[in-house]
């Protein structure tokens, strides 16, 4: 039995991006894994032939008979996985060579943790996206947004099975955030404070093509978390923060340090002014 199952759904993927993604998996320092690649664009024979051209016994190519969508495809991969840990991998991103080893080592030594992620860097940019590492802080932040990068995460499969949790199509294209929502209180979260993942942003990715739907679904999930975990939300609101202002959304007007995340009500009614909150 492999220790890790790498789960990668693909759909009409750029071959250039896919080659980089696959190579980054095959070049991991941790070699004890199976690599499940599920094609959700079954009529794309070019994509199929490309995956089959890789000569590595760890790759297991699968194909849906028809397009099923990302959530159903992710669940199919979970059910087929034989590994103790599930490494999520998107078809257009890159994992650093030590990612699987460091994430699996953390899960090995922290049995109370069911999800481990890492910091990441966007390709072509110098800025590193840093997430909190402590479970309590991550759980509080989840009431506002996803502070675990799904693409850089590794999940303990038993946590999903024991709690009967899977991805939910009603929350697509934010099914990853919904998964974390379902896991709050059922396991602990952790982020390794290192860049173990490179994220690619491009015009054809789902989050770019379905921006409005993504925003609406994430807002729905956010409201569900706040209703079901009001204690976490109150703790989140009490975190110190910096409020920045922009005129028409792009002209900086200044910053204001606050003792909590609660925006004074009168700021909400100033025309042409956008407000952004950053916790410190």
Image (cartoon, helix red, strand yellow):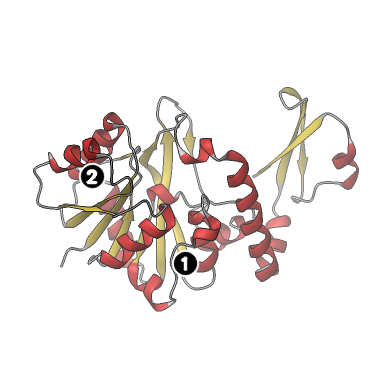
Q: Position of residue 29 (x, y in %)?
A: 18, 47
Q: Tell which of 145 and 130 is nearer to you.
A: 145
Does 155 sit above or below residue 119?
below
Q: Tell which of 51 and 254 is nearer to you.
A: 51
Q: Residue at x 79, y 51 (%)?
A: 262
Judge whether residue 259 can be spotted in this image.
Answer: yes
Q: Position of residue 55 (x, y in %)?
A: 8, 43
Whether residue 78 sits left or right of residue 221 in the image: it is left
Q: CA distance from mark 2 to mark 1?
A: 26 Å
Q: Position of residue 11 (x, y in %)?
A: 35, 43
Does 270 sit above or below residue 56?
above
Residue 188: which disc?
Answer: 1
Q: Residue at x 32, y 64 (%)?
A: 78
Q: Residue at x 69, y 53 (%)?
A: 239
Q: Tell which of 4 and 179 is nearer to you.
A: 179
Which of pointers 2 and 1 indicates the residue nearer the eye? 2
Element type where label 2 sits in the image: helix
Whether residue 50 sits left or right of residue 129 in the image: it is left
At label 2, counting other C-alpha atoms closer than 10 Å, the crowd grade (few under 14, some 14-19, many 20 or more) is many
At label 1, counting other C-alpha atoms closer than 10 Å, the crowd grade (few under 14, some 14-19, many 20 or more) is some
Q: Tell which of 111 and 227 is nearer to you.
A: 227
The residue that disc 2 covers is 25
Label whose residue precedes the other's in the sequence (2 or 1)? 2
Does 275 sit above or below residue 251?
below
Residue 166: which disc?
Answer: none
Element type where label 1 sits in the image: strand
Q: Residue at x 41, y 52 (%)?
A: 70
Residue at the bottom extreme of this rendering: 162
């Amino acid at each position: 039995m492999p220790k890790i199952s790498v789960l990668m759904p693909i759909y009409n993927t750029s071959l250039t991006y896919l080659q980089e993604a696959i190579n980054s998996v095959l070049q991991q320092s941790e070699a004890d894994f199976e690599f499940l690649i599920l094609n959700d664009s079954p009529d794309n024979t070019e994509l199929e032939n490309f995956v089959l051209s890789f000569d590595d016994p760890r790759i297991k190519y699968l194909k849906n008979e028809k397009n099923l969508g990302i959530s159903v495809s992710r669940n199919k991969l979970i059910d087929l996985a034989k590994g103790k840990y599930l490494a999520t991998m998107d078809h257009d991103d890159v994992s650093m060579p030590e990612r699987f080893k460091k994430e699996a080592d953390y899960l090995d030594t922290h049995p109370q943790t069911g999800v481990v992620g890492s910091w990441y860097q966007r390709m072509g940019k110098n800025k590193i996206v840093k997430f909190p590492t402590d479970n309590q802080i991550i759980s509080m932040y989840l009431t506002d947004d996803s502070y675990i990068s799904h693409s850089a995460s590794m999940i303990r499969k038993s946590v999903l099975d024991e709690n009967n949790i899977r991805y939910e199509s009603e929350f697509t294209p934010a099914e990853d955030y919904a998964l974390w929502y379902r896991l709050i209180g059922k396991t602990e979260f952790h982020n390794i404070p290192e860049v173990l993942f490179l994220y690619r942003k491009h015009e054809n990715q789902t989050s770019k093509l379905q921006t409005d739907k993504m925003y609406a679904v994430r807002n729905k999930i956010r409201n569900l978390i706040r209703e079901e975990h009001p204690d976490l939300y109150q703790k989140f609101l009490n975190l110190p923060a910096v409020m920045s202002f922009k005129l028409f959304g792009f002209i900086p007007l200044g910053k204001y340090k606050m003792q909590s995340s609660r925006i004074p009500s009168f700021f909400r009614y100033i025309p042409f002014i956008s407000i952004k909150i950053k916790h410190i």
